[in-house]
Amino acid sequence: MLLSTLLACALSLPALAQTAGNATATATSLLPVPSYGTRTEDAFATATASALASSLPGYTYNLTQETTSYCATARCTSDAANVTVNFCNPTTMGWNCECNNKAESRLQPLFVPVNTYDCRLRTAACLDQCQNPSASPPVSNAQACRQACNYILGSTCGTANQVLPEYQVDKYDDKPKYYAE
């Protein structure tokens, strides 16, 4: 059930975007908004992230566009080859990056934005369950649970130890497996 909830979150990225001042804040509802403590004479002494958000510059972030940009930038293992397949489906988050002339893409799955975002969401979902009184199986030690989520999942994001989801597909309309069976 946790996996289906996570996948529903990952597949509904527009639902996760919220406007914060001029910026687009993504997935801020997954974790509590932190308070920032600074020196008392500073203007932001008792400000929270929500209050600071109005000071952010305008910017946009498009996960599917970031994924295709990474593919184009990585190029191919042979100078005689070009990227011929480069897509990321915004509905399924399925992506692919391929080259012609039997060359491989130099894009490493570990750095594909869809995969790193999945790792962060998976960590957040795990941490949320540590605080869930209805969790099944029940959580007997919330602190140990949080440590386990952060160590086993969160600390691996962006490293060689990260569990890579299977979002890579052959064709644009193919549905990813998401996780190995």
Image (tube, grey):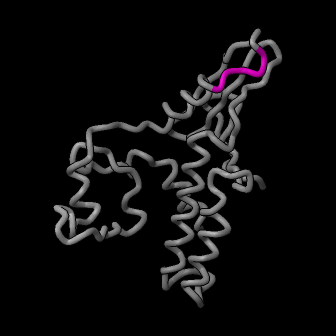
Dividing the picture into quarters, in which one does residue 166 lie?
top right
- Quadrant (top left, top right, bottom left, bottom right) of the N terminus: bottom right
What percent of the width, then of the height, locates residue 26?
Answer: 39, 50
Left or right of residue 181: residue 84: left
User: Does residue 76 belong to the magenta stretch?
Assistant: yes
Name the residue nearer the viewer: 48 or 124. 48
Quadrant location of residue 70?
top right
**Which residue is found at the position 67% from the left and 68% from the top?**
152
Residue at left offset 63%, top offset 50%: 158
From what the image shows, is residue 162 above or below residue 177?
below
Q: Residue at x 26, y 65 (%)?
A: 48
Of residue 58 and residue 92, the one placed in the foreground of this image is 58
Q: Which residues are magenta?
A: 74-78
Q: Quadrant of the C terminus?
A: bottom right
Apparent side of residue 130 relative to residue 177 in the rendered image (left or right): left
The picture places residue 111, in percent across and down from the top left corner, at: 63, 41
What type of secondary structure mainly makes up the magenta span? loop
Residue 83: x, y in percent? Answer: 67, 18
Please provide percent x and percent y for residue 84.
67, 16
Nearer to us in this view, 107 or 100: 107
Q: Is residue 117 above or below residue 82?
A: below
